[in-house]
Amino acid sequence: MTPEFVIGFARQAIELTLLISLPMLGVGMAVGVLVSVIQAATQIQEMTLTMVPKIVAIFLALLVAFPWIMDKMVTYTRELFLNLPNYIR
């Protein structure tokens, strides 16, 4: 294994991790901004008002994106196992 291969392999794993987490992070950020705007407009500064909608929205985004996430993970794992003999050389 060359250093370039190890760096490329780690880069591919990190890119997949970021790609998989993107839907939940995006929904969490959008809901957080929306709740912050509502809090600023109404001057209600309650911490649970911020957390509960974000948790629910992220959970719903996870449910919606789960088939896509599993497809990406299965594809990555399948490619990893199929190319394992090439990685050992």
Image (cartoon, rainbow, N blue to C red):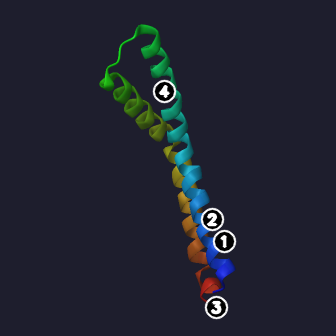
- Picture coordinates of residue 1, whole percent (x, y): 63, 86
- The amino acid marked with disc number 2 is Gln
Q: In this view, does 69 lie to the left or right of 11?
A: left
Q: Mark 3 points at which residue?
A: 89
Q: Name the residue under label 4.
A: 31
Which residue lies most toward the bottom here? 89
Query: What's the residue at 66%, 85% (across, down)?
Result: 2
- Picture coordinates of residue 80, whole percent (x, y): 58, 73
Q: What element carries label 4?
A: helix
- Is the C-beta separation of discs 1 and 2 under 8 Å? yes
Query: What's the residue at 39%, 11% (across, down)?
Result: 43
Q: Name the residue under label 1.
A: 8
Query: What's the residue at 46%, 41% (across, down)?
Result: 62
Q: Is mark 1 on a helix, strand or loop?
A: helix
- The amino acid marked with disc number 1 is Gly
Who comes first in sequence, dot 1 or dot 3?
A: 1
Q: Label 3 crowding class (10 Å Cα cut-off): few <14, some 14-19, many 20+?
A: few
| Number of the front mark, 3 or 2 | 2
Q: Is residue 24 left or right of residue 84?
A: left
Label 1, label 2: how far apart the Cα atoms are: 6 Å
| Number of the front mark, 1 or 3 | 1
Q: In this view, does 38 lie to the left or right of 80?
A: left
The one nearer the camera, 24 or 86, is: 24
Q: Label 4 crowding class (10 Å Cα cut-off): few <14, some 14-19, many 20+?
A: many
| 18 is higher (above) or lower (below) than 14 | above
- Is the C-beta separation of discs 4 and 1 under 8 Å? no
Q: Which of the numbered marks, if any, corresponds to residue 12? A: 2
- Picture coordinates of residue 89, whole percent (x, y): 64, 91
- Is the C-beta separation of discs 1 and 3 under 8 Å? no
The one nearer the camera, 63 or 87, is: 87
Who comes first in sequence, dot 4 or dot 1?
A: 1
